[in-house]
Image: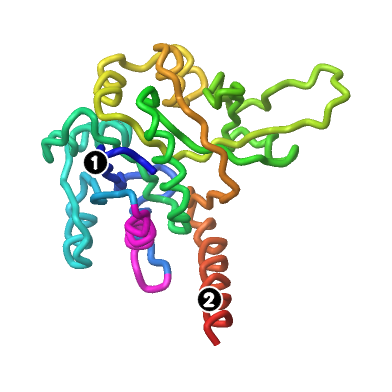
Amino acid sequence: MINSNKCYGFIPARYESSRFPGKPLAEIANKPMFWHVYNRSIQCPYLDQVYLVTDDNRIYDASLNLEIPVLMTAKHHASGTDRILEACGHLNITGESVILNIQGDEPLLHPEMLTQLIDPFEREEVQVSTLARQITNPEAENPNLVKVIFSHQHKALYFSRSKIPYYAGSSQNPIYWGHVGLYAYKLDVLKRFATLGPSFLEQTEKLEQLRFLEAGIPIHIQQTTHKSYGVDEPEDLRIVKSILEQEQSDAGNFGS
Protein backbone atom coordinates (compact mmCIF):
# COMPACT_ATOMS: atom_id res chain seq x y z
CA MET A 1 0.00 0.00 0.00
CA ILE A 2 1.41 3.39 -0.98
CA ASN A 3 2.04 6.15 1.57
CA SER A 4 0.00 9.34 1.79
CA ASN A 5 1.51 10.97 -1.31
CA LYS A 6 -1.01 11.99 -3.94
CA CYS A 7 -1.04 10.01 -7.20
CA TYR A 8 -2.03 11.53 -10.54
CA GLY A 9 -2.43 9.79 -13.86
CA PHE A 10 -1.85 11.61 -17.16
CA ILE A 11 -2.73 10.30 -20.62
CA PRO A 12 -0.84 12.19 -23.37
CA ALA A 13 -3.02 12.37 -26.50
CA ARG A 14 -1.34 13.95 -29.51
CA TYR A 15 -3.19 14.23 -32.80
CA GLU A 16 -0.20 14.30 -35.15
CA SER A 17 1.42 10.93 -35.77
CA SER A 18 3.52 9.89 -38.75
CA ARG A 19 2.09 6.36 -38.81
CA PHE A 20 -1.44 7.05 -37.56
CA PRO A 21 -2.70 10.66 -37.60
CA GLY A 22 -5.63 11.25 -35.26
CA LYS A 23 -4.93 8.02 -33.36
CA PRO A 24 -6.49 9.07 -30.02
CA LEU A 25 -9.82 9.59 -31.81
CA ALA A 26 -9.79 6.17 -33.53
CA GLU A 27 -13.12 4.51 -32.81
CA ILE A 28 -13.27 1.28 -30.81
CA ALA A 29 -16.69 -0.07 -29.82
CA ASN A 30 -18.30 3.31 -30.62
CA LYS A 31 -15.91 5.26 -28.39
CA PRO A 32 -12.58 7.02 -29.14
CA MET A 33 -9.45 5.17 -28.10
CA PHE A 34 -8.65 7.65 -25.31
CA TRP A 35 -12.02 6.91 -23.67
CA HIS A 36 -11.04 3.26 -23.21
CA VAL A 37 -7.64 4.20 -21.75
CA TYR A 38 -9.23 6.69 -19.34
CA ASN A 39 -11.99 4.36 -18.17
CA ARG A 40 -9.53 1.57 -17.48
CA SER A 41 -7.14 3.94 -15.71
CA ILE A 42 -9.71 5.26 -13.23
CA GLN A 43 -10.26 1.71 -12.01
CA CYS A 44 -6.85 1.87 -10.29
CA PRO A 45 -7.71 2.51 -6.61
CA TYR A 46 -4.47 4.42 -5.89
CA LEU A 47 -5.06 7.24 -8.39
CA ASP A 48 -6.51 10.45 -6.95
CA GLN A 49 -7.23 11.89 -10.42
CA VAL A 50 -6.66 11.06 -14.09
CA TYR A 51 -6.35 13.68 -16.84
CA LEU A 52 -6.10 13.61 -20.60
CA VAL A 53 -3.43 16.05 -21.86
CA THR A 54 -3.49 17.14 -25.48
CA ASP A 55 -2.42 19.85 -27.92
CA ASP A 56 -5.39 19.49 -30.27
CA ASN A 57 -8.82 21.13 -30.15
CA ARG A 58 -10.53 18.08 -31.69
CA ILE A 59 -9.32 15.81 -28.92
CA TYR A 60 -9.99 18.47 -26.29
CA ASP A 61 -13.60 18.95 -27.43
CA ALA A 62 -14.23 15.21 -27.68
CA SER A 63 -12.96 14.81 -24.11
CA LEU A 64 -15.27 17.49 -22.79
CA ASN A 65 -18.21 15.88 -24.59
CA LEU A 66 -17.42 12.60 -22.85
CA GLU A 67 -16.93 14.38 -19.49
CA ILE A 68 -13.29 13.35 -19.24
CA PRO A 69 -10.97 15.79 -17.40
CA VAL A 70 -8.67 17.31 -20.02
CA LEU A 71 -5.86 19.88 -20.12
CA MET A 72 -4.64 21.75 -23.19
CA THR A 73 -0.86 21.94 -23.55
CA ALA A 74 1.57 23.51 -26.02
CA LYS A 75 2.23 21.94 -29.42
CA HIS A 76 6.02 22.17 -29.28
CA HIS A 77 6.63 19.36 -26.79
CA ALA A 78 8.98 16.65 -28.07
CA SER A 79 7.51 13.93 -25.85
CA GLY A 80 4.56 12.97 -23.69
CA THR A 81 6.80 13.42 -20.65
CA ASP A 82 7.28 17.13 -21.42
CA ARG A 83 3.54 17.49 -22.00
CA ILE A 84 2.81 15.92 -18.62
CA LEU A 85 5.26 18.22 -16.87
CA GLU A 86 3.46 21.27 -18.29
CA ALA A 87 0.13 19.83 -17.12
CA CYS A 88 1.52 19.37 -13.59
CA GLY A 89 2.40 23.07 -13.57
CA HIS A 90 -1.16 24.03 -14.54
CA LEU A 91 -2.47 21.99 -11.59
CA ASN A 92 0.11 23.23 -9.06
CA ILE A 93 0.98 19.66 -8.07
CA THR A 94 3.50 19.32 -5.24
CA GLY A 95 6.97 17.79 -5.54
CA GLU A 96 6.41 14.57 -3.58
CA SER A 97 3.39 13.56 -5.65
CA VAL A 98 3.61 10.43 -7.79
CA ILE A 99 2.95 11.07 -11.49
CA LEU A 100 1.89 8.31 -13.88
CA ASN A 101 2.57 8.50 -17.60
CA ILE A 102 -0.19 6.35 -19.12
CA GLN A 103 0.20 5.67 -22.83
CA GLY A 104 -2.80 6.93 -24.79
CA ASP A 105 -2.55 4.10 -27.32
CA GLU A 106 -3.16 1.27 -24.81
CA PRO A 107 -6.95 0.77 -24.98
CA LEU A 108 -6.64 -2.71 -23.40
CA LEU A 109 -4.68 -1.45 -20.40
CA HIS A 110 -5.26 -3.60 -17.31
CA PRO A 111 -5.87 -1.39 -14.23
CA GLU A 112 -3.70 -3.67 -12.10
CA MET A 113 -0.69 -2.57 -14.14
CA LEU A 114 -1.08 0.94 -12.71
CA THR A 115 -1.34 -0.46 -9.19
CA GLN A 116 1.88 -2.41 -9.83
CA LEU A 117 3.56 0.83 -10.97
CA ILE A 118 2.57 2.68 -7.82
CA ASP A 119 3.27 -0.05 -5.24
CA PRO A 120 7.08 0.50 -5.10
CA PHE A 121 6.59 4.11 -3.92
CA GLU A 122 5.79 2.86 -0.44
CA ARG A 123 9.60 2.91 -0.17
CA GLU A 124 10.94 6.42 0.12
CA GLU A 125 14.00 5.76 -2.05
CA VAL A 126 12.00 4.86 -5.16
CA GLN A 127 12.00 7.73 -7.65
CA VAL A 128 10.91 6.10 -10.93
CA SER A 129 9.16 2.83 -11.69
CA THR A 130 8.18 0.94 -14.82
CA LEU A 131 7.02 -2.56 -15.79
CA ALA A 132 8.55 -5.59 -17.49
CA ARG A 133 7.15 -8.95 -18.53
CA GLN A 134 8.92 -12.12 -19.56
CA ILE A 135 8.95 -12.56 -23.33
CA THR A 136 9.80 -15.32 -25.78
CA ASN A 137 12.96 -15.64 -27.82
CA PRO A 138 11.17 -14.63 -31.08
CA GLU A 139 9.64 -11.59 -29.34
CA ALA A 140 13.11 -10.56 -28.16
CA GLU A 141 14.25 -10.38 -31.80
CA ASN A 142 11.81 -7.52 -32.50
CA PRO A 143 13.56 -4.10 -32.25
CA ASN A 144 10.17 -2.44 -31.67
CA LEU A 145 9.76 -4.44 -28.46
CA VAL A 146 12.22 -2.87 -26.02
CA LYS A 147 14.17 -5.23 -23.77
CA VAL A 148 15.36 -4.52 -20.23
CA ILE A 149 17.83 -6.18 -17.87
CA PHE A 150 17.78 -5.46 -14.13
CA SER A 151 19.56 -6.26 -10.88
CA HIS A 152 18.50 -8.55 -8.04
CA GLN A 153 17.22 -5.37 -6.36
CA HIS A 154 14.98 -4.79 -9.42
CA LYS A 155 16.91 -1.73 -10.56
CA ALA A 156 17.18 -1.32 -14.33
CA LEU A 157 20.68 -1.90 -15.68
CA TYR A 158 19.92 -1.15 -19.33
CA PHE A 159 17.12 -0.86 -21.89
CA SER A 160 17.73 -1.71 -25.53
CA ARG A 161 16.09 -2.42 -28.84
CA SER A 162 18.72 -5.12 -29.24
CA LYS A 163 18.36 -8.60 -27.81
CA ILE A 164 19.81 -8.41 -24.29
CA PRO A 165 21.48 -10.14 -22.59
CA TYR A 166 23.64 -11.82 -25.21
CA TYR A 167 24.05 -15.51 -24.34
CA ALA A 168 27.70 -16.14 -25.26
CA GLY A 169 27.70 -19.92 -25.49
CA SER A 170 25.85 -20.24 -22.20
CA SER A 171 24.08 -23.51 -21.47
CA GLN A 172 21.34 -21.63 -19.64
CA ASN A 173 17.88 -21.34 -21.12
CA PRO A 174 17.60 -17.75 -22.38
CA ILE A 175 15.35 -15.46 -20.33
CA TYR A 176 14.32 -12.12 -21.79
CA TRP A 177 12.26 -9.30 -20.31
CA GLY A 178 10.23 -6.93 -22.44
CA HIS A 179 9.68 -3.38 -21.27
CA VAL A 180 6.08 -2.24 -20.85
CA GLY A 181 6.06 1.50 -21.57
CA LEU A 182 4.19 2.80 -18.53
CA TYR A 183 5.99 4.98 -15.99
CA ALA A 184 5.52 6.46 -12.56
CA TYR A 185 7.76 9.21 -11.19
CA LYS A 186 8.12 11.53 -8.26
CA LEU A 187 7.38 14.99 -9.63
CA ASP A 188 10.74 16.35 -8.46
CA VAL A 189 12.66 13.77 -10.49
CA LEU A 190 10.44 14.44 -13.50
CA LYS A 191 11.41 18.11 -13.32
CA ARG A 192 15.09 17.14 -13.13
CA PHE A 193 14.63 14.85 -16.16
CA ALA A 194 13.34 17.78 -18.21
CA THR A 195 16.34 19.98 -17.35
CA LEU A 196 18.90 17.34 -18.38
CA GLY A 197 18.14 17.38 -22.08
CA PRO A 198 18.46 14.37 -24.39
CA SER A 199 21.38 12.07 -23.54
CA PHE A 200 23.77 10.17 -25.79
CA LEU A 201 22.28 6.71 -25.21
CA GLU A 202 18.76 8.09 -25.39
CA GLN A 203 19.43 9.51 -28.83
CA THR A 204 21.32 6.40 -29.95
CA GLU A 205 18.60 3.90 -29.04
CA LYS A 206 15.70 6.36 -29.34
CA LEU A 207 14.65 5.40 -25.80
CA GLU A 208 13.79 8.26 -23.46
CA GLN A 209 14.19 6.19 -20.27
CA LEU A 210 17.95 5.90 -20.86
CA ARG A 211 18.24 9.58 -19.90
CA PHE A 212 17.44 8.59 -16.31
CA LEU A 213 20.10 5.87 -16.23
CA GLU A 214 22.80 8.05 -17.75
CA ALA A 215 22.06 10.67 -15.10
CA GLY A 216 22.38 8.08 -12.33
CA ILE A 217 18.65 8.12 -11.52
CA PRO A 218 17.58 4.54 -10.68
CA ILE A 219 14.50 3.02 -12.32
CA HIS A 220 12.67 0.36 -10.33
CA ILE A 221 11.44 -2.57 -12.43
CA GLN A 222 8.15 -4.15 -11.42
CA GLN A 223 7.40 -7.52 -13.00
CA THR A 224 3.97 -8.06 -14.52
CA THR A 225 2.20 -10.88 -16.31
CA HIS A 226 -0.12 -8.51 -18.15
CA LYS A 227 0.60 -8.03 -21.82
CA SER A 228 0.61 -4.65 -23.52
CA TYR A 229 -1.43 -4.18 -26.71
CA GLY A 230 -0.37 -0.81 -28.10
CA VAL A 231 -1.88 0.68 -31.24
CA ASP A 232 0.91 1.97 -33.48
CA GLU A 233 -0.75 1.65 -36.89
CA PRO A 234 -4.36 1.41 -38.16
CA GLU A 235 -3.88 -2.34 -38.69
CA ASP A 236 -3.38 -2.79 -34.93
CA LEU A 237 -6.99 -1.70 -34.32
CA ARG A 238 -8.25 -4.98 -35.76
CA ILE A 239 -6.32 -6.97 -33.16
CA VAL A 240 -7.44 -4.70 -30.31
CA LYS A 241 -11.08 -4.85 -31.37
CA SER A 242 -10.93 -8.63 -31.57
CA ILE A 243 -9.45 -8.93 -28.06
CA LEU A 244 -11.99 -6.46 -26.67
CA GLU A 245 -14.88 -8.40 -28.22
CA GLN A 246 -13.52 -11.60 -26.67
CA GLU A 247 -13.22 -9.91 -23.26
CA GLN A 248 -16.83 -8.71 -23.47
CA SER A 249 -17.98 -12.16 -24.58
CA ASP A 250 -16.15 -13.85 -21.71
CA ALA A 251 -17.63 -11.35 -19.23
CA GLY A 252 -21.12 -12.02 -20.60
CA ASN A 253 -20.65 -15.77 -20.35
CA PHE A 254 -19.34 -15.45 -16.81
CA GLY A 255 -22.41 -13.43 -15.78
CA SER A 256 -24.92 -15.79 -17.41
Q: Which mark is residue 100?
A: none
The residue beneath circle 2 is 251
What residue is at 31 percent from the left and 20 percent from the top?
193
The answer to whether residue 42 is magenta is yes
Left or right position of 38 against 111: left
| Snapshot quadrant of residue 202 | top left
Along the viewing direction, whichever of 178 and 56 lies nearer the viewer: 178
What residue is at 43 percent from the left and 55 percent from the top?
111
Task: Classify mark 2: helix, strand or loop.
Answer: helix
Looking at numbered disc 1 in the image, what kind of residue is underneath it?
Lys
Residue 198 pos. (x, y %): 36, 17
Left or right position of 243 against 119: right
Which residues, given as a range, are shown in magenta?
Answer: 29-45
Along the viewing direction, whichever of 181 and 206 lies nearer the viewer: 181
Residue 33 pos. (x, y %): 37, 60
Left or right position of 233 against 57: right
